[in-house]
Image: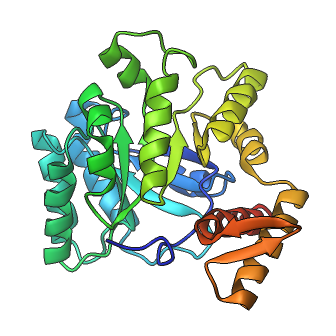
Amino acid sequence: MTTDDQKIVRPRRSFIFAPGLRPELYPKALACGADIVCVELEDGIAPHDKDEAREKTMALFTQPQADDGVERIVRINCLRSAVGLDDVKAILATDTPPPALMLPKVVSPDEVIWLDDLLTESGHDTRLHIIIEMNAGLEAVFDIARSSSRIDALFFGGVDMSADLRCKNAWEPLLYARSRVVHAAASVGVDAVDVPYLDLDDLEGMKAQAQLAKDLGFSGKGAVHPKQISALNEVFTPSPEEVAKAQKILAAFEEANTGLVVVDGKLIEKPVVREMQRIVSVAKRASF
């Protein structure tokens, strides 16, 4: 298992999907300001278009990707489906796999372990992002989070989760589920990213829910349209005061080289270092 200090800390304030069937939209998505662009092969692609979308998506990664600070991910289909297996076969067969994969509807750590083993056998360094959107996945989320050192983030899927839990798709009914995902992500030092806000005409409502998500421990939130990105980035970007405090704490730990320091009269233990690193990383991305 990769330790917290070895994990790459990067901002994940916002993400947006780009349809795999329309590769011409990929550069536009990369330029929209989102920290993560996810090329979509799952729900956004009709069954009869899956093969074409997969082929076009794989072609996007045959050339080196620009070092522009945007994280590239491909959301494949469920690993327990035939089309998901086809996605995996295509990824294993290429010499230029996507940098990261988003796995939907994960319900068991065995799924992740299986894919990790196959990627390792193929010599691929591909990272993994896991969507927790099923009741069974919520039950097993702690084991899922620990199932692979390739995992960088857990994503919360509210629409499918609310259907599976038979509850309203709203903040309070899903608060326990969200909290459990955040808890699991924090237990292994990876990010938690919240579900997109679906009402495009309610930016204030989206900002309010994004603030609730941030306060709960989420690192970012999804968008369904580029016009939502700047507001999400604003909410999840730390304030200058937060950045200054983080830099001060990191400097204190570097100078002391111990697991415990005192900053401004307060005792601070080393586990806080990763969060301070994340704050500084997000701040750098905000001024990219």
28 left or right of 173 in image: right
Extreme residue toward the left, this view: 82
Residue 222 shows in this picture: yes
Vertical position of residue 183 compared to residue 69: above or below = above
Q: Residue at horizontal 67%, vertical 75%?
A: 260
Residue visible at 71% across and 81% down in the picture: 253
Quadrant where the C terminus lies?
bottom right
Reply above or below: 45 against 219: above
Residue at figure coordinates x 72%, y 36% from the top left: 227
Quadrant housing residue 2: bottom left
Numbered marks: total: 0
| Residue 160, position as x, y percentages in the image | 36, 23
Residue 268 placement: quadrant? bottom right
Q: Is residue 238 above or below residue 265?
A: above
User: Where does residue 103 sit, x and y in percent of width and height?
Assistant: 30, 47
Whether residue 23 is visible: no
71 and 166: which is toward the camera = 166
Work out which quarter of the rendered image holds the N terminus and state it.
bottom left
> Between residues 147 and 105, which one lies in front from this camera angle?
147
Q: How is the image coloured?
A: rainbow
* Image location (x, y in percent) of residue 33: 69, 53
Q: Is residue 207 above or below residue 1?
A: above
25 on left or right of 123: right
Q: Which residue is pictured at 20% across the width and 69% down the height?
A: 119
Q: Nearer the viewer, residue 25 or 265?
A: 265
Place of residue 206 in the rendered image (x, y in percent of width and height, measured from the top left):
69, 27
